[in-house]
Image (spheres, helix red, strand yellow):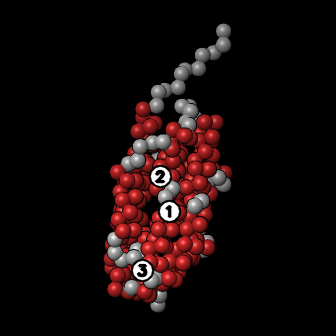
Amino acid sequence: MSLLKELYEPYILPARARLSTDGVIRRLGDATLEPHVLERFFIQYHALGVYMTEPLESWVRREGQRCLMQGLDSLGKGLLAQARQEAQQHVMLTDDLRLLVRRWNLRRSGPLHSERLLAQFPTDAMRDWRLLVEDTLTGEPPGAQIALAYEVGHFIQTVGPVLLAHVARGLGRETIDGLTYLKENSQPATGRAITQARMMEELLRTMPENAQVLAELGTEMINIHLRFLEDCLQSAEAALWSQPPAAPHRPPH
């Protein structure tokens, strides 16, 4: 049995259960959710997600350097190598956002602007996420950022396919073709996901006594990211409610 299943999962599984029962997950899967609300949710998810992912490369590099300073050479070198892979996460989200905005502007009233969407003020959940990572990078144990990254990966691998299925249902399968970030990160067999799982195993092998602490960090990550999804849905609905109605069509004289 892997150390993940033996030491870590008994503590994290109750939090993971929320990924199928939480209210925001049920609302996004509700067949009565109007397509334009779902579409606006995905625009918000990608726009606000840039704030959540932009520091990834820096976070992973800093944790790698800290591990090296603590004598955890294998973990440190692995993190420094992984940091380069993280640099493209927010870029993919930005590219996907621009595609979604173009699609919206072709089909919906009330034109959107990618730069304005990217400049939105962060929500409490978004700020809490950055604070959690920063606290992890300066707290104990060293290497704990690996657990956060692993649990984020599991979160997207669990929720991502559900979201993509809702896209196909509500917006058409052709929309999925442009959602690079969700498609790529929803796959458990990608090199990034395999690397995260391997490093988590190594972290548990190095410090098995910290399995519960690492799972508590993972639980906090799940709570914050579910709040983030709720923020995206609420702000999407609010934006649509505040949108002025389209001008009535006047027939030519």
Give the x, y percent position of residue 79.
52, 74
Of labels 2 and 3, earlier in sequence is 2
What residue is disc 3 on?
A: 70
The correct choice, above or below, for 204 with respect to 237 in the image is below
Tags 1 and 2 touching, CB below 8 Å: no
Real-space Cα separation, disc 1 to disc 2, in angstroms: 13 Å
Give the x, y percent position of residue 234.
40, 45
Question: Depth-wise, is mark 2 or mark 3 nearer the camera?
Answer: 3
Give the x, y percent position of residue 159.
49, 63
Q: Secondary structure at mark 3?
A: loop
Q: As drawn, is 111 to the left or to the right of 122?
A: right
Q: Residue at x 46, y 56 (%)?
A: 52
Can I make out residue 38 in this image? no
Q: Check disc 3: other Cα within 10 Å, few if <14, some if 14-19, many if 20+.
A: few
**Kind of residue indicated by mark 3:** Gln
Q: As drawn, is 185 to the left or to the right of 143?
A: right
In the image shown, does 212 or 253 lie closer to the viewer?
A: 212
Q: Secondary structure at mark 1?
A: helix
**Kind of residue indicated by mark 1:** Ser
Of labels 1 and 3, earlier in sequence is 1
In the image shown, does 120 or 37 lie closer to the viewer?
A: 120
Tag shown at residue 51:
2
Q: Check disc 2: other Cα within 10 Å, few if <14, some if 14-19, many if 20+.
A: many
Question: Depth-wise, is mark 1 or mark 2 nearer the camera?
Answer: 1
Give the x, y percent position of residue 21.
38, 63
